[in-house]
Amino acid sequence: MYLKSELLSFSELGTLDSQPAGTADGCRASCVDWYGNSRPLFLGKRIFALMGYEIVEGRLQGGRMAELNRLNFAPAIMQISR
């Protein structure tokens, strides 16, 4: 969720959401636990969200967050041996 701060008051701008890969990636414990599932990245005037195996680019349009591009770099389906 992205927020706007104005005069010490927050209002919601919107979200950039992940789309679960749905494939086993070989992680033996929850990979989300050690880094969280979302990292906002601000590069110049560009806005990105790193979520799991995705990078999503967003832009403020009409006072709301809108998705522009999405890159999924999930590994191919893996066989997990135990």
Image (cartoon, rainbow, N blue to C red):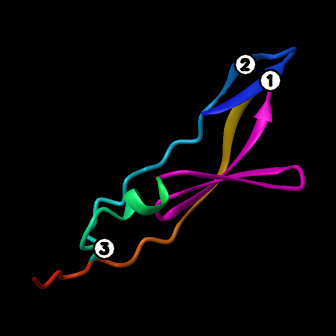
Residue 77: % across, % down: 28, 76
Whole-angstrom CA distance, mark 3 to mark 2, is 37 Å
Considering depth in this image, is 54 or 40 the residue closer to the camera? 40
In the rendering, at what x and y percent does residue 38 appear?
A: 54, 51
For the N terminus, the quadrant is top right
Which residue bears the numbered disc 2? 10
Q: Residue at x 71, y 18 (%)?
A: 11
Decide which of tag 3 and tag 1 comes sooner along the chain. 1
| Quadrant assignment for the C terminus | bottom left
Say if the magenta span includes residue 41: yes
Task: Report the residue at 48% width, 48% height from top.
Answer: 18
| Above or below, 79 relative to 54 | below
Q: Secondary structure at mark 1?
A: strand
> Which segment is the magenta one?
37-61
Left or right: 34 with respect to 69? left
Q: Are marks 3 and 1 in contact (CB under 8 Å)?
A: no
Disc 2 from disc 1: Cα separation: 5 Å
Depth order, front residue of 4/45: 4
Q: Earlier in the sequence, mark 2 or mark 1?
A: 1
